Amino acid sequence: NAGVMQNPRHLVRRRGQEARLRCSPVKGHSHVYWYRQLPEEGLKFMVYLQKENIIDESGMPKERFSAEFPKEGPSILRIQQVVRGDSAAYFCASSPMQGRFLEAFFGQGTRLTVV
Amino acid sequence: SQQGEEDPQALSIQEGENATMNCSYKTSINNLQWYRQNSGRGLVHLILIRSNEREKHSGRLRVTLDTSKKSSSLLITASRAADTASYFCATDEANSKLTFGKGITLSVRP
């Protein structure tokens, strides 16, 4: 059984470009969570999605950031017009049920560097 | 806002010693989890303790939970150099997401 798969593992973008981060959840999991980790910091919640629905986006910056989890395919976190402050590790987690986060299955993360 | 706050921020011990890390939180929780993260890597789930449990063991790990004090501790016994990592507590609140603390950096000297 494959765990949560994130790609790419490392992504370098110039200021002003777009970054697209992909997350394939554990097979059978329909709940996906995105977190951001700045250097020397803990993980900060960004967004919680179910298939085709955004459930909680209270941690998402109001501009330039968007997330989707289509019926088919991986979840995508999209950052438009990246700035240096977007440099961070972005982690995705999936779970099989809503309401009780019994055990989050985390991916290895995508490390975004904006130059 | 930060829910889990770990203490101490950094801990350095000798191999073979025990390491105790603490976590405090603010709101009611369904469960509390501890994770490990090696430098530059992803998160590894260590142990989960439910709100109605007081203590749990897994190998060299022992976790306690005191809901009256809103605190938890993670004890690693007989530490090894390979235990060197950052450790995070995460709380599962009623709003269906995990909230992480800033983490504790543990260094185990061989």
Image: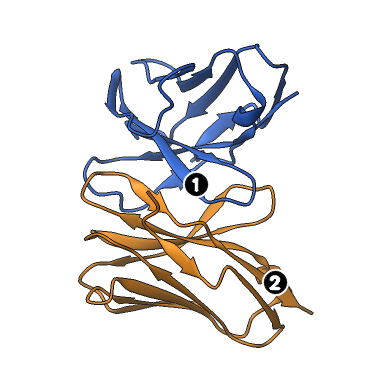
> In x, y percent, where is residue A99?
21, 44
Q: For residue A28, say whether it is visible.
A: no
Secondary structure of the residue carrying tag 2 is strand
Give the crowd class for mark 2: few <14, some 14-19, many >=20 residues within 10 Å: many
> In x, y percent, where is residue A102?
31, 53
According to the picture, the residue beneath numbered tag 2 turns out to be B107
Q: Is residue A12 above or below residue B12?
A: above
* C-alpha span from label 1 to label 2: 20 Å
Q: Nearer the viewer, residue A45 or A68?
A: A45
Q: Is residue A23 left or right of residue A14?
A: left
What's the residue at 34%, 62% (across, down)?
B32
Q: Are marks 1 and 2 in contact (CB under 8 Å)?
A: no
Residue B90 placement: quadrant: bottom left
Hey, what amino acid is under mark 2?
A: Ser
Q: Is residue A38 left or right of residue B80?
A: left
Q: Is residue B87 left or right of residue A75?
A: right
Please identify which colour was used for chain A in the image: blue
Specify the chain shown as orange: B
What's the residue at 64%, 46% (across, down)?
A39
Q: Chain of mark 2?
A: B
Q: How is the image coloured?
A: by chain
Give the crowd class for mark 1: few <14, some 14-19, many >=20 residues within 10 Å: many
Q: Is residue B32 left or right of residue B73?
A: left
